[in-house]
């Protein structure tokens, strides 16, 4: 168990340093980063002064070593647009993104797992065909297109939900989202819903054919007990890794949805940083998102190991 845990942690740290290298290279793969940061009317003297100020006149290896040193301290430089430390801006946007991803994951689990269980429990029936169709539909509809359709129907035509922004209310001292989160969360959850529906259906079908389920049926156990004690419990084990991966996707893949709905999260911040060529802010956002994704994958591996002891000996 300890060997498995240490190996996963080692791979996570190595991957994190790989991400640092890729984030660092974001500034250099497009050419001279200084020429992209300054105004087109800047003089050569102003460009050279900025290059020296930012340290881009030094050898690339020295720049990378300094970048890694500062990054490990949470220092990614100052945003050109906001005139604030880039990581501070990222931290300010984290709650909105976590809020949106959490609600989207809840919707996906509620819809996807339910659809998967219904389809897997009734194979080769009309209900199973509907479940498979909904699962396939969830994975093929583009989320940004769905977001626009939801705005047109439920915001502009019906007026049921706000078309943009993040509105909250206070309850027992807690800041909670109101109905403004429904449309972006639903649009963001659709792909994950399709994934969970497919995997849940496959897991239920696989467990239903196991010998211990057949033995339980032969003993005359009630159908509800068989499902709760054997089928659903064992079907949930492979879903743990899927849910962990999908939650990291929801956190890092919400750039289109946040932009469409003007949701003040990390995705919207990254889109603004890219459009304004705010490279230090792009670096901070990209690194933090990657750090969260790698961390979630590590936590998922640990939980999976605890739930299924067989993984420890592989």
Image (tube, rainbow, N blue to C red):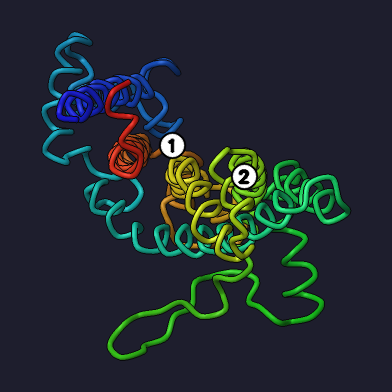
In the picture provided, is 110 more to the left or to the right than 248? right
Left or right relative to 220: residue 5: left
171 displayed left or right of 165: left
Instruction: Pick the quarter of the image with the N terminus.
Output: top left
Residue 272 visible, this orientation: no
Residue displayed at 72% across by 75% down: 155
Comparing 93 with 137, the one in front is: 137
Residue 32 visible: yes
Mark 2: secondary structure:
helix
Residue under the image location 20 percent in, 18 percent down:
64
User: Which residue position is annotated with label 1?
Assistant: 277
Question: From the viewer's perspective, is residue 250 above or below residue 60?
Answer: below
Give the class, few, some or many, for how many residues have Cα within 10 Å of label 2's Cα (few <14, many ≥20).
few
Q: Position of residue 8 (x, y in %)?
A: 25, 27
Q: How far apart in space, not on screen, are marks 2 and 1 (Cα)?
A: 61 Å
Rendering coords of residue 2 (x, y %): 15, 29
Nearest the viewer among 171 and 128 is: 128
Q: Which mark is residue 214?
A: 2
């Amino acid at each position: 168990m300890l060997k498995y845990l240490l190996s996963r942690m080692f791979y996570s740290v190595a991957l994190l340093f790989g991400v640092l290298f890729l984030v660092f290279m974001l500034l250099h793969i497009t050419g001279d980063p200084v020429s992209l940061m300054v105004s087109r009317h800047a003089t050569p003297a102003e460009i050279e002064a900025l290059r020296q100020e930012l340290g881009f006149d030094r050898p690339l290896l020295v720049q990378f070593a300094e970048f890694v040193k500062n990054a490990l301290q949470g220092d990614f430089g100052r945003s050109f647009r906001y005139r604030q430390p880039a990581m501070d801006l990222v931290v300010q946007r984290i709650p909105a993104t976590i809020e949106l991803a959490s609600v989207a994951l809840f919707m996906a689990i509620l819809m996807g797992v339910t659809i998967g269980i219904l389809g897997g429990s009734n194979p080769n029936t009309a209900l199973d065909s509907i479940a498979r169709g909904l699962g396939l539909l969830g994975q093929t509809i583009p989320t940004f297109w769905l977001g626009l359709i939801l705005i047109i129907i439920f915001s502009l035509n019906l007026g049921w939900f706000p078309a943009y922004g993040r509105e909250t209310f206070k309850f027992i001292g807690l800041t909670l989202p109101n109905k403004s989160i429904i449309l972006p969360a639903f649009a963001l959850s659709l792909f994950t819903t399709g994934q969970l529906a497919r995997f849940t259906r496959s897991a239920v079908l696989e467990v239903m054919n196991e010998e211990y389920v057949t033995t339980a049926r032969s003993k005359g156990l009630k159908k509800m007990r068989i499902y709760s004690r054997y089928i659903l419990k064992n079907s949930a084990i492979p879903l743990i890794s899927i849910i962990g991966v999908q939650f990291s996707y929801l956190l890092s893949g919400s750039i289109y949805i946040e932009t469409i709905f003007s949701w003040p999260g990390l995705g919207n911040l990254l889109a603004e940083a890219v459009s304004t060529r705010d490279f230090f802010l792009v670096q901070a956002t990209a690194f933090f998102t990657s750090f969260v994704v790698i961390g979630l994958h590590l936590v998922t591996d640990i939980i999976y190991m605890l739930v299924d002891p067989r993984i420890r000996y592989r």
